[in-house]
Amino acid sequence: MLGLPGMRAVRRLRSCYRWLDDRLGIDDALGKSVLHRTVPRQANFSFCFGGLSFLLFVLLFVTGCFMTLYYVPSVDHAHDSVDFMMYEVSLGAVVRSAHHWSASLIVVTLVIHMARVFVYGAYKRPRELNWMTGVALLGLTLASAFTGHLLPWDQKGYWATKVGAHIVRSTPWLGEYLYAILLGGPEIGAVTLVRFYALHVIFLPITTVCLLLAHFWMIRRHGIKYDL
C-alpha cells in the first residue's frame, strides 16, 4: 500500500497527465488501435524477444547518450576518457557496463526473435517487407557493435577492427574501395576513430530508429502470426 506521500505523488502525476492530454490528445492518438490489443492464448514466451530487443535498444541509446558526455573521440584521449568514466565518474562503471552487456544481449535476443519468426512462417506474404526490415535491423545492430568495438581505443578493439577491415577488403572488385572508405586511409588511425564514432552515435542510430518505426507500423498493419 502507498503511504500518504506516495498517494500525493500519484495524484500529481495524474494531474500532469490530464493537463498534457487536454492539450496534446494523447489518449486519442494512443487509442484502441495502438495500445489496447488483446493477447491471444497462443502467444508464449518466445514472442517476447522482439520486445526485449527493443528495450535493450532503448537502454543502449540512453546509456550511450550519457557516455558521450565524457568520451573524447581522439587517439590521444579516447582510452583515457573511458578510464575516467569507469573509475572517476559516479556510476560511470554501471552505465558503461549496462551498455556493454546490452550490446551483447541484443544480438542474442534478435537471433532468437528472428528464429521464432522463421519457424512460424511469419516472413511470408503479406509480411515480406517486415522480414526484410528485421534482417536490416540485425545488420545495423552488428554494424553498431563493430564500430563501437574500436571506440575504447585499446588493443582488443584495434585488432578486432583490423581483422574486420581485412574481411571487408577481401570483397571481390569493391574490396579496396570499401576498405579505404571504412578506415579513411590505408591504416587504422585518427580518421578511422572519428569515422567509427560518427557512424556509431549518429548515422547507425538514426537509420535504426527509422527502420524500427517502419517495422512497428507494419506489425500493426498485418498483426502477429501466432499459429504454426
Image (tube, helix red, strand yellow):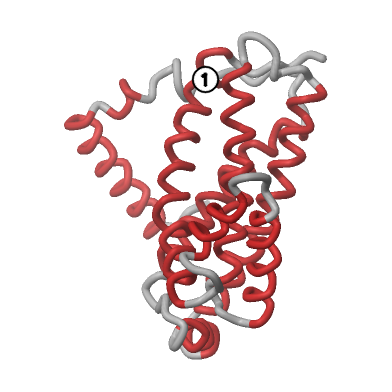
Place residue 65 in its image quadrant: bottom left
The 10 Å Cα crowd at callout 1, few under 14, some 14 to 19, many 20 or more, is some
The residue at 69%/36% (across/down) is 48
Residue found farthest to the top: 125
What residue appears at the point 50 percent right and 78 percent down from the top-left corner? 92
Residue that appears at 20% across and 38% down? 19
Q: Looking at this view, is 206 or 221 the one in front?
A: 206
Residue 111: x %, y % from top left: 74, 41
| Amino acid type at image mark 1 | Met
Residue 154: x and y in percent read 61, 82
Q: Looking at the picture, tell me which residue is in the foreground, 45 or 195.
A: 195
Residue 107 lies left or right of residue 185; in this view the side is right
- Look at the image and tell me whether residue 89 can be seen: no
What is the number of callouts on the image?
1
Residue at the extreme left of the image, as rendered: 23
Quarter of the image where one finds residue 158: bottom right
Q: Mark 1 points at which residue?
A: 218
Whether 226 is drawn above or below 5: the answer is above
Instruction: Identify the element where label 1 is drawn.
Output: helix
Residue at 41%, 61% in the rendered image: 198
Q: Where is residue 169 in the image (x, y as percent from the top left)?
A: 65, 56
Residue 106 in picture, x, y percent from top left: 66, 50
Image quarter of the C terminus: top right
From where the camera sits, is residue 159 visible? yes
